[in-house]
Amino acid sequence: MTPTVDELRDEIRLAVDRYERVESTAFTKEALAAICGAVGYDVDTDRLPPKSRMRAGILWKVGLTDEDDPAQADRPFRTAELEAIAEALRDE
């Protein structure tokens, strides 16, 4: 059975030492920063960059895009992207 988007988000959150969410919600900036760290994309944690910059870096680091272009990541992750991120974190 294919995991739902919520299940994938929670799997990713737990993989980066964040907590599961009861309600369905996109990643916070803090969660995105934790994912960035887990996939090897450096971000300044004193002043977090925009979500689109962090999403772009994550997608680039897991091999879904050729560059870390925030214009290509101006929306929450889609199911296939969440699956790829979860898979990359499982391999860590």
Image (cartoon, helix red, strand yellow):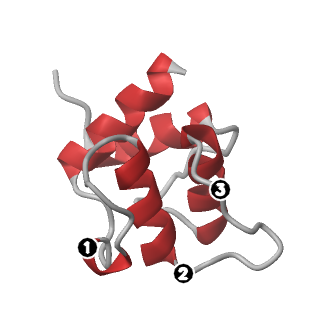
Label located before the other in sequence (1 or 3): 3
- The type of residue carrying mark 3 is Asp
Q: Position of residue 36 (x, y in %)?
A: 58, 52
Q: Is residue 30 above or below residue 21?
A: below
Q: Position of residue 56 (x, y in %)?
A: 39, 64
Residue in the image at 77% along x and 67% along y = 45
Label located before the other in sequence (2 or 3): 3
- The type of residue carrying mark 1 is Gln
Could you say which is closer to the camera, residue 64 or residue 21? 64
Could you say which is closer to the camera, residue 38 or residue 3? 38
Dividing the image into 4 quarters, which one contains the N terminus?
A: top left
Q: Secondary structure at mark 3?
A: loop
Q: Is residue 71 above or below residue 31?
A: below
Q: Is residue 11 above or below residue 46?
A: above
Q: Secondary structure at mark 2?
A: loop
Q: Quadrant of residue 8?
A: top left
Residue in the image at 57% along x and 48% along y = 35
- The type of residue carrying mark 2 is Pro
Q: Quadrant of residue 76?
A: bottom left
Q: Nearer the viewer, mark 2 or mark 3?
A: 3
Relative to 60, 44 lies left or right? right
Q: Is residue 25 visible?
A: no
Q: Tag on residue 60?
A: none
Could you say which is closer to the camera, residue 23 or residue 66? 66
Q: What residue is pinned by disc 2? A: 50
Furthest-front residue in view? Answer: 66
Contact flag, marks 2 and 3 (Cβ < 8 Å): no
Q: Tag on residue 42?
A: 3
